[in-house]
Image (cartoon, rainbow, N blue to C red):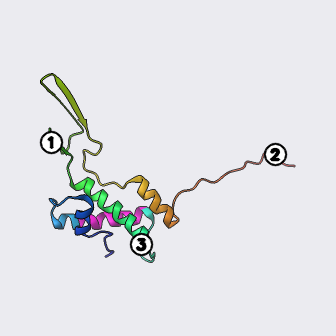
Amino acid sequence: MATAYATVDEYQVDTGDTSSGYARVESMLAQQSAKLRAVAGITATDALSEDQLLMCRALVTDACRKALVAPATEAMGDMAGLKQASFTANGFQGSYTFSNASGSAYFDRDTLRALRRSLGTSQSIGTIVPSYGGA
């Protein structure tokens, strides 16, 4: 089995999440590492540089945090599963909108783009020059 790009201790340092269970975090790190290898095209024979390994760690720990830590605010409490909430108190109104209410694990696009560029697997746009008629 391929290894995860981060340990549970590194996840806790990077995210500040110490409430998620050890086994659950460890499993999620392995799953997201496998997903990252598939998305970025990393094979078992690839030797990653220290910078590439750090980007892999950042991507995996961030994706796991998005899935494991439910959004919450002090005023509203646990907002797990909600997309929007609003309140009115003493004539004041407020609302909250959460972008990842479902708790999906997804990679940061900017960091993923940088990793893929460093691996040489990023997309590029070429130029097509049409030829009209013959000479």
- Check disc 2 and give the amino acid type: Gly
Q: Disc 2 to disc 3, how far (Cα)?
A: 52 Å
User: Which numbered marker is on residue 50?
Assistant: 3
Occupied quadrant, residue 115: bottom left
Q: Which structural element holds mark 3?
A: helix
Q: CA distance from mark 2 to mark 1?
A: 69 Å
Indicate the secondary structure of the residue bearing disc 1: loop
Q: Kindly report the distance in space between the C-alpha atoms of the residues bearing marks 1 and 3.
A: 38 Å
Q: Please identify the quarter of the rendering in which residue 107 is found.
A: bottom left
Amino acid type assigned to the residue bearing label 3 in the image: Glu
Residue 22 place in picture, x, y as percent: 17, 67
Query: Callout 2: 10 Å neighbours few (<14), some, many (20+)?
Result: few
N-term-proximal mark, 1 vs 3: 3
The residue type indicated by label 1 comes to: Glu
| Side of 14 relative to 110 (left or right) | left
Residue 7 placed where, x, y %? 26, 70
Q: Is residue 115 left or right of residue 24?
A: right
Would residue 97 be counted in the magenta stretch? no
Vertical placement of residue 92 versus 29, above or below:
above
Tell which circle, 2 or 1, labels the residue nearer the N-terminal end. Answer: 1
> Residue 32 placed where, x, y %?
31, 63
Which label sits in the foreground, 2 or 1?
A: 1
Seen from the viewer's position, the closer of residues 20 and 127 is 20
Reading the image, the residue beneath label 1 is 74
Residue linked to disc 2 = 133
Residue at horizontal 23%, vertical 66%?
A: 27
Which secondary structure is most common in the magenta stretch? helix
Please give the range of residues in magenta.
27-39
Q: Label 3 near label 1: C-beta < 8 Å?
A: no
Q: In front here: 13 or 107? A: 13
